[in-house]
Image: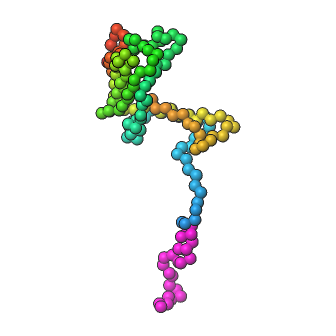
Amino acid sequence: MTRLDPGTRRRGPSWAQLLVAAVVMVAPVRVHACACCSEQGQRLETTDVLRAYERGELERVEFAATARLYTTAAFPDDIKGLATPSEEPYGFRGSLVAGQFVFDISDKSGKTGQIIMALPRSMTRFEIDPRKEGVQAGGTGPALYKEWRLEGEVRRRGILRAAGREPRGG
């Protein structure tokens, strides 16, 4: 056994310090976390470069197999860009391939059309916390409304061409 001179200091943690550290690390701790924090009525609208994260999320989007036209009491006169609009569901397939969105549709008679839009370099992000005063958010936190707006030239083919004229970008 080696004795230390009274004036010599020990280096490193003592056994008591190590024991306390071990107990603190093993003790169960209740933790609450959230992915986003917002204030009631908070609103954000910003346009920025489309980054790798957003591109990755857009690649993960899965589209429904059918789509319906939004119409009003003025149907079919309120529909532009379809030679023969229908209130029946359209077959739909959407994908992001080689930097462009491709949307294929087909009507019940088998006629097809396509919209192609290059992925833009920027996007507008719109977010709002629509909570009302005095209403407690349930579950995992506030229900936030988030929207990504992408704008660009489109090409339309088949039944999606404007009747009697070539659409801009087409």
Asked whether 6 falls inside the magenta stretch, the response is yes
Q: Residue at x 35, y 18 (%)?
A: 110
- Viewer-proximal residue, 23 or 86? 86
Residue 144 visible in the shown view? yes
Asked whether 67 falls inside the magenta stretch, the response is no
- Viewer-proximal residue, 119 or 68? 68
Q: Is residue 22 left or right of residue 51?
A: right
Q: Residue at x 40, y 38 (%)?
A: 60
Q: Residue at x 39, y 18 (%)?
A: 108
Determine the image quadrant of residue 99: top left
- Viewer-proximal residue, 90 or 154? 90
Using the image, determine if residue 88 lies above or below residue 137: above
Instruction: State the colouring used for the structure image.
Output: rainbow
Determine the image quadrant of residue 155: top left
Residue 103 percent location from the top left of the image: 36, 26
- Viewer-proximal residue, 28 or 54? 28
Q: Residue at x 53, y 11 (%)?
A: 73
Residue 152 visible in the shown view? no
Using the image, determine if residue 38 lies above or below residue 118: below
Residue 83 percent location from the top left of the image: 38, 11
Using the image, determine if residue 3 lies above or below residue 121: below
Q: Which residues are magenta?
A: 1-24
